[in-house]
Image (cartoon, grey):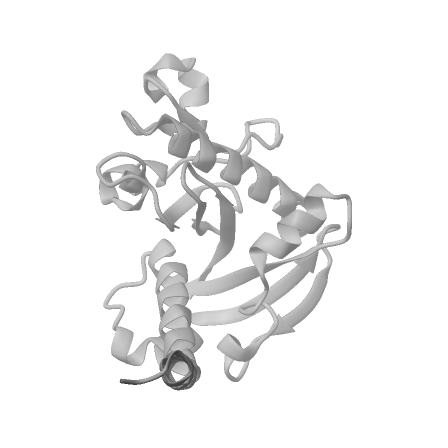
Amino acid sequence: MYSNGYIFRYAAILVIIAAALLSTAAMMLKPFQERNMAIEKMGGILASANVENIDKEVMIDQFNEFVTEALVVDQDGNVVESLTEGEKENGKAFNINMKEQLYRKTNGMDYELPIYKIDDKGKTIYIFPLYGTGLWGPIWGNIALSQDLNTVVGVTFDHKGETPGLGAEITTSPFEDQFIGKEIFDDNGQFTSIAVVKGGVAKLPEADRIHGVDAISGGTITSNGVNDMLKNVLESYVPYIEKQK
């Protein structure tokens, strides 16, 4: 019969070996996980501008082909970095942590945000990454504006853990397609964002419906999260937009 000391040592050795194997596996898989996350991020950026025939197998090449410029702008709308050539996925814009930068904004500190430009038959589409909070965790996405820097070309949204059939519906075409053609500035040039309206955009005055979409039925908190995300992040880009106009 084995002694208690022997059993303890044997169990401890097994635990150490298992931990070492798991740590090694995690380290080996990390580059693949990061690459997949980067490819998913690139796909969301391109999809928001309605780039067709997106292929995960050649996503990096497509991203570098379609994105003509990757910018970093500060809180005053000044361009901090502009990358037009090379591997844009390795540039500062692509690797900015939106959560961290928006936290800095909330606390009154200097911050920097990314912008991507895509050429669409001689016209520029501007893509602005988004980040916010839903019901169960972070939500994020991209909103693409036409050359007038006002009219929405398309959006993509994603989430970490919103409820299937409810808040998770932010990732579906019926929700995302509502944003196409909406405007983020009013006729006087004042920033309005795009409201996600509980009960439907029909509740708004007719003149304001161009600035609103229907909320998700049963997904009020997630809809509010999208609404707040759009307002908070887009207003952060207003200084840059005004400089371009």
The vertical placement of 224 against 65, above or below, is above
Residue furthest right as drawn: 109
Closer to the camera, 118 or 57? 57
Q: Which residue lies at the image location 44% right of the left edge and 44% below the top edge?
A: 137
Q: Position of residue 121 (x, y in %)?
A: 38, 64
Position of 17 with respect to 109 (left or right) is left
Closer to the camera, 3 or 212? 3
Position of 188 with respect to 239 (left or right) is left
The vertical placement of 67 against 25, above or below, is above
For residue 214, what is the image quadrant? top left
For residue 120, what is the image quadrant? bottom left
Q: Position of residue 156 (x, y in %)?
A: 36, 50
**The N terminus: image quadrant:** bottom left
Q: Position of residue 179 (x, y in %)?
A: 36, 38
Closer to the camera, 64 or 162? 162
Residue furthest front as drawn: 1
Q: Say whether residue 172 is visible.
A: yes
Position of 18 with respect to 130 (left or right) is left
Count up the numbered dots: 0
Q: Say whether residue 194 is visible.
A: no
Position of 57 with respect to 23 (left or right) is left
Q: Which residue lies at the image location 34% right of the left edge and 42% below the top edge?
A: 162
Q: Position of residue 142 (x, y in %)?
A: 44, 52
Q: Which residue lies at the image location 43% right of the left edge and 39% below the top edge?
A: 134
The vertical placement of 211 against 123, above or below, is above
